[in-house]
Image (cartoon, rainbow, N blue to C red):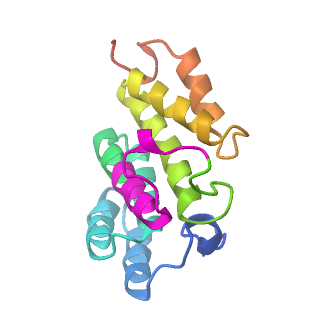
Amino acid sequence: MNLLTGAESTALFGGEISPSIRHLVDRARQAPREEAAAILWPACVSAPQSLPVYYLLYKLHAGLGELDQAEQAASKGLAAAARAAGLPTDWHAVQPGQADFAAPGAARFWLFTLKALAFVQLRRGERGIAQALVEQLARLDPGDQVGASVVRALLAESGPSSLGLKRG
């Protein structure tokens, strides 16, 4: 099961997590939000291929406003998903057709995490990086299956002083 939605983890992330990692995730879910990251980061170290843990980490940190940590978790999750999907580790180098981004699994998680990274970059005030990520998402997902249009709209509507963004 997906750790947050109840949907099958296989459909969203390309596979179930091991029982030992599930135990850590269950502990993190029961811990206060401020303490959950201290449980989840070691899970990433012990099972770097476990994509759901990266998802939980970047969602947790973003929700707490810890944007540097959210960026770190999303970047690590993006790299892990790229390895699992056979994609280049540099997101700039990924081309349409290199993977089936619509099918459940690592490639779809990679695309979804690219969107999360765009959102985190926008919130961090890194408008140029967010714009480049959104443009890559449009190339790879022209049907907007992962919902990058939400980030694109925020980017278009927000000024440098919106969303806590810095100027530049």
**Which residue: 64% across, 46% down?**
146
Q: Nearer the viewer, residue 159 or 102?
A: 102
Q: Is residue 56 visible?
A: no
Q: Main secondary structure of the magenta part?
A: helix
Q: Nearer the viewer, residue 57 or 112?
A: 112
Q: Quadrant of residue 139?
A: top right
Query: Where the N terminus falls, by quadrant?
Result: bottom right
Look at the image and say whether residue 85 sits in the magenta stretch.
Answer: yes
Q: Nearer the viewer, residue 99 or 40?
A: 99
120 vs 41: above or below: above
Q: Quadrant of residue 138?
A: top right
Query: Where the C terminus falls, by quadrant?
Result: top left
Q: Quadrant of residue 79?
A: bottom left
Magenta part of the protein: which range?
Answer: 74-96
Image coords of residue 68 (percent x, y): 29, 41
In the image: residue 166, left or right of residue 85: left
Look at the image and say whether residue 65 sits in the magenta stretch.
Answer: no
In the image: residue 166, left or right of residue 111: left
Q: Is residue 90 visible?
A: yes
Image coords of residue 137 (percent x, y): 57, 38
**Which residue: 34% across, 55% down?**
76
**Which residue: 42% across, 30% down?**
123
156 vs 15: above or below: above
**Which residue: 32% across, 42% down?**
66
Image coords of residue 113 (percent x, y): 49, 50
